[in-house]
Image: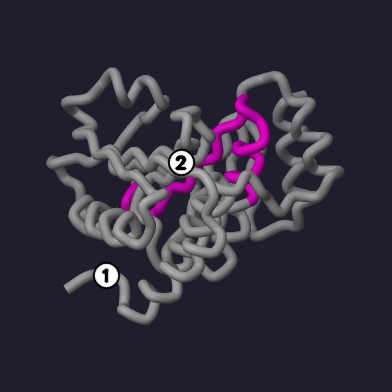
């Protein structure tokens, strides 16, 4: 039995057929040691891949593929890196399973990468494109948090429009030690360059302000 219901598969298949333009490459780094959801992540990716031939999935074992992990700056597993058709990196990352409410973010990412269309305002794009320093955005979530997708998708959109930015979703239960390190008591919690922290699904304007503050 799969993870997606037949009605959801049909809905996504029709959506992808109408909206996808260019191929999207998904790179999954699995882990045979202490990986609670690797099997489910692989199953989910396989099910999504089967819905449209513009979606391509490649899997690597994190411990046996250090060069590939380093290529995409993958620090731990399970992890997903998302690439454009030409193999260029979007800076979009999922650490942990993109399930529950985060599945919608995963689908939005696929469509954004395929079409090149994001939902950011012109003002936000103007400000973010000025950034010339590396920016690391971590967003801690749980699958049952209805406010988390907004924070994650904002981080992913910023990464998509500026190659200096990496937007990372962390599923807090799968990355409990990291969540404890960053004192994650509520989600979503975003940390920019380990210097600026904020909680909640803040508006785009506020989110961009925090990112710009971190790179001053």
Q: Residues within 10 Å of mark 2 (few under 14, many from 20)?
A: many
Residue that numbered label 2 is attached to: 93
Left or right: residue 142 compared with residue 116:
left
Q: Position of residue 128 (x, y in %)?
A: 75, 34
Residue ID at (63%, 54%):
199
Q: Earlier in the sequence, mark 1 or mark 2?
A: 1
Left or right: residue 28 compared with residue 207:
left
Residue ID at (63%, 44%):
116
Residue ID at (41%, 68%):
13
**Callout in the foreground (1, 2):** 1
Left or right: residue 186 compared with residue 55:
right
Q: Position of residue 74 (x, y in %)?
A: 37, 30
Colouring used for the render: one colour
Boundaries of the magenta span:
154-175
- Note whether 100 is above or below 153 in the view shown: below
Residue 27 lies in what quarter of the image?
top left
Mark drawn on residue 143:
none
Residue that numbered label 1 is attached to: 3
**CA–CA distance between discs 1 and 2?**
21 Å
Q: Position of residue 21 (x, y in %)?
A: 54, 50
| Residue closest to the eye, 167 or 60 | 60
Left or right: residue 79 compared with residue 184:
left
Residue 202 lies in what quarter of the image?
bottom right
Residue 103 lies in what quarter of the image?
bottom left
Q: Residues within 10 Å of mark 1 (few under 14, many from 20)?
A: few
Q: Is residue 166 magenta?
A: yes
């Amino acid at each position: 039995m799969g993870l997606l219901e037949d009605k959801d598969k049909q809905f996504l298949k029709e959506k992808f057929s109408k909206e996808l333009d260019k191929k999207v490459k998904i790179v999954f780094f699995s882990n045979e040691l202490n990986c609670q959801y690797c099997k489910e992540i692989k199953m989910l990716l396989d099910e999504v891949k089967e819905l449209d031939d513009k979606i391509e999935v490649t899997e690597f074992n994190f411990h046996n593929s250090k060069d590939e992990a380093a290529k995409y700056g993958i620090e731990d597993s399970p992890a997903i890196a998302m690439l454009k058709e030409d193999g260029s990196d979007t800076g979009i990352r999922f650490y942990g399973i993109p399930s529950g409410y985060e599945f919608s973010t995963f689908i939005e990412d696929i469509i954004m990468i395929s079409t090149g269309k994001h939902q950011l305002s012109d003002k936000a794009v103007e400000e973010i494109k000025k950034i010339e320093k590396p920016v690391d955005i971590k967003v801690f979530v749980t699958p049952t948090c209805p406010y988390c997708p907004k924070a994650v998708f904002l981080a992913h959109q910023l990464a998509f429009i500026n190659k200096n930015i990496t937007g990372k979703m962390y599923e807090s239960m799968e990355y409990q030690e990291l969540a404890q390190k960053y004192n994650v008591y509520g989600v979503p919690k975003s940390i920019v360059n380990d210097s600026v922290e904020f909680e909640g699904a803040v508006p785009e304007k506020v989110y961009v302000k925090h990112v710009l503050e971190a790179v001053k």
